Amino acid sequence: MAATSEIAIPQCAEDIAPCWVQQVLQKDLPGVTITDVQVKGSINQGEGFTSDIVAFDAVGIRNGASQRYSLIAKLSDFERPLTILKHWSKDFQIKVDMTEVKFYSKAVPELLSVAIPNTELKSKAGNEDNANHPVESFKFLPKCYFAATDPSSMVSVRVMENLKAQGFSIKANRQSLNHDEMMLTAGALAQLHGLSHRLELREGIPLPEKYDWIISLSDAPDVMMESVTYQYQTAVKAFAAAFPDQADLVARLEKLEMKVLELLLNEAPGLKVLNHSECWINNIMFKYTEGVPTDVKLVDWQSPRYLPPTHDLTLLFLCNTSWDVFHNHRDAILAHYHHKLMETLGPNESSGLQSYTLDQLKADFKVDCVHGVLARLFRLMVLPADPDLLQILQEIQEWGVI
């Protein structure tokens, strides 16, 4: 186990021992004594391309009572193969792992520090959402107890609550998100976006100046960007093969190739917030009660970006849901997002997103759908082209976006 100035960084599952877990938990659980750790092994539910996710239970005593904590340790795994972006270098993997460490250790405490207290939300008249979620406000991401990187090995660790043990899961076989699941996820994104904007207003400086670790694709190596262009070309060919009668739509998608790197690398105009930027099925976990989704957590925060809020939303719609939800429920979901955004910003903010109307949001969503199209095409290897995607793209084509 490699040591830092404070708490050691485990290099593998065998390093997860009671004394170490006790150190990790002491900050959030003062007085806890860990007597045993039961390591259950890897539980990677999604691709887990860059990390080994090790589940373990910690048993101990706190305040005179026996306690059991179900946790995971997310460890860098430099041997894990990359099946999509094969040119993702070790140096870039180190960067994104360290980004998630800094997100949890630096950004999350500050984001939550600017949240409107839940008691204040309860007292606001006309708050229709609070009746459904009266307690766990702003808990849209897993609790992280410890996040750090060993400077010698560059292995990162993030110790978090085990969501799977709490009943959360990723949808099996990459099934589309239904209306209720989309509403929950859009609300979670609204809270992220709103908190980041509140923090930026409080600090008085753009978030990228405060957090120089926020991912920018200009940080990616040239060989990776070449891979992205090749991947896009391959995706368009796969789409054309799936729908040979869609020559006009395919031609429009081919023309987008010239814009791919420009769209990815250029500074986006307008108001920006902290985006998850990878909010697709593998990174969204739901909890259900009698088959109804009641809670959501967004996971894998290795590539947060500073972009307009509609970037996250277009990816959410294009990569996660069906034609029916996209076409028939989009306005309701965007309205819910907007309501949660305004609620998160609070009534006392007088600038920025507070004046962002629902009509503006809907208009920006349509314009920015090109980013969602690119995100969806990049995932054709794992989310194959289907009739729902065709109908969604045809509607976006009617908007004049592609």
Image (cartoon, rainbow, N blue to C red):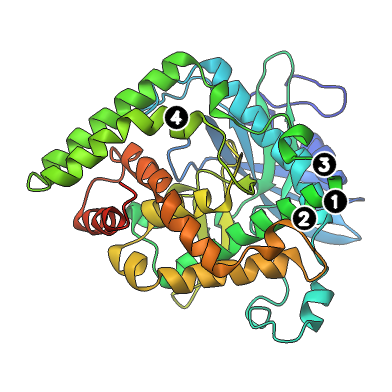
Q: Is residue 274 left or right of residue 78?
A: right
Q: Is residue 264 left or right of residue 86?
A: right
Task: Name the residue tied to disc 2.
Answer: 198
Label 2's element? helix
Query: Farthest residue toward the front?
Result: 400
Callout 4 touching callout 3 (CB < 8 Å): no
Crowding at dot 4, Cα within 10 Å, few <14 / some 14-19 / many 20+, comes out as few
Label 3's element? helix
Of badges 4 and 1, the one in the foreground is 4
The Cα atoms of the two marked residues, 4 and 1, are separated by: 32 Å
Label 4's element? helix
- Percent across and percent down for residue 162 are 62, 51
Label 1's element? helix
Task: Name the residue tied to disc 3.
Answer: 22
Residue at screen point 58% across, 38% down: 54
> In front here: 279 or 247?
247
Task: Name the residue tied to disc 1.
Answer: 202
Mark 2: amino acid:
Arg
From this view, report whether residue 43 is shown above or below residue 76: below
Task: Name the residue tied to disc 4.
Answer: 262
The Cα atoms of the two marked residues, 3 and 2, are separated by: 34 Å
- Percent across and percent down for residue 332 are 47, 74
The Cα atoms of the two marked residues, 1 and 3, are separated by: 35 Å
The image quarter in which residue 98 lies: top right
Residue at screen point 31% across, 55% down: 396
Crowding at dot 3, Cα within 10 Å, few <14 / some 14-19 / many 20+, comes out as many
Callout 3 touching callout 2 (CB < 8 Å): no
